[in-house]
Image: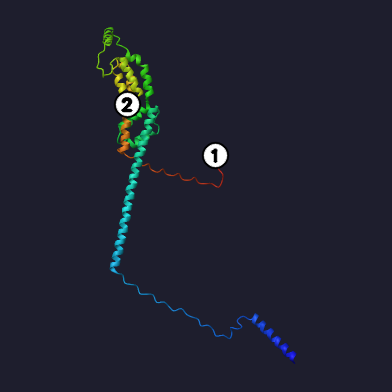
Amino acid sequence: MLAIAILAFVIGLGLMAYAVRNTPGFFARGSSPTPVTRPTPTVAPAPATADPSTLALREAALAAQLANLEARAARTDAETAEAAVNAGKAEAILVTFAARRALDRGAGLGYLEGEMRRRFGATLPRQVGTVIRAARQPVTLENLRESLTAAAPMLLATPSDWWSGIGSELRNLVVIHRADTPSPLPSDRLARARRQLDNGNVETALAEVERLPGAADAANWTAAARRWIDARAALDTLETAAITGAFAPPPTRPSEPQPAPAPTSAMPADDGLL
């Protein structure tokens, strides 16, 4: 009987362990259910009444910010306009500088002709035309020196009339002049003209050549020298206008319409028909 009781007790423990392991909520069945808490509805606060003084302060602050933004926009516009003017001056100076270099080398202006007409044609048309004509018939200092050397016998030649020739020889036998004045002898004038050309003073050299006996027979040289002088004077005027901004800005070029893309075909085109 004792053995049967012990065996029944062991079997009961086994069944209880099996029930605890495989039956969820075994111990919670007898417990009391937990109460469910429901959220209490929140009451929205009543809107506060607007204060007139606060609104006035806010309007004043917004007005000050708006005025500050407008002042910044005005300063930005002024700086942009000034930058555009300075850029135009710089481009005009570069154009005149490039034109001077082309004339000094005896080369044509090329595209610079159009740039000079666009920038200075409305305000300084005479100077622009002088520079363009000089570039189409270029004269350099080297050309003037070589031409003067070639024309030296013609410039120093005495008149063909024997009476005028004798008078010229007699006048050149004894020459009286002040010590601080240059010699009026033709050979000395020609030497001074050459020195002035070497220094780039074409105007002074031209004045010396025009006082030589054969200046009338060297009209080609004097014309070339005057063309050189006129072109440099015109360039000086254009450079001054470019620096001071006394020129018309170039007109804005209209944007060119973009060509429409060619329609694509699914079939390859025959090269012999194109």
Q: Quadrant of the N terminus?
A: bottom right
Q: Nearer the viewer, residue 27 or 86?
A: 27
Q: Residue at x 35, y 36 (%)?
A: 93
Q: Residue at x 71, y 86 (%)?
A: 10
- The residue to which callout 2 is attached is 229
Q: Earlier in the sequence, mark 2 or mark 1?
A: 2
Number of residues whose C-alpha sits closer than 10 Å to that of mark 2, classed few (under 14), some (14–19) or many (20 or more): some
Callout in the foreground (2, 1): 2
Q: Quadrant of residue 70?
A: bottom left
Say above or below: 50 vs 177: below
Badge 1 element: helix
Say above or below: 152 vs 62: above
Pinpoint residue 249: horizontal percent, then vertical percent.
33, 40
177 vs 116, left or right, is: left
- The residue to which callout 1 is attached is 273
From where the camera sits, is residue 8 visible?
yes
Say above or below: 91 vs 221: below
Pinpoint residue 77: horizontal percent, then vertical percent.
33, 49
Q: Nearer the viewer, residue 89 or 130?
A: 89
Q: Nearer the viewer, residue 127 or 7?
A: 7
Number of residues whose C-alpha sits closer than 10 Å to that of mark 1, classed few (under 14), some (14–19) or many (20 or more): few
Q: How is the image coloured?
A: rainbow
Q: Quadrant of residue 106?
A: top left
- Badge 2 amino acid: Ile
- Badge 1 amino acid: Leu
Q: Residue at x 37, y 17 (%)?
A: 149
From where the camera sits, is residue 251 visible?
no
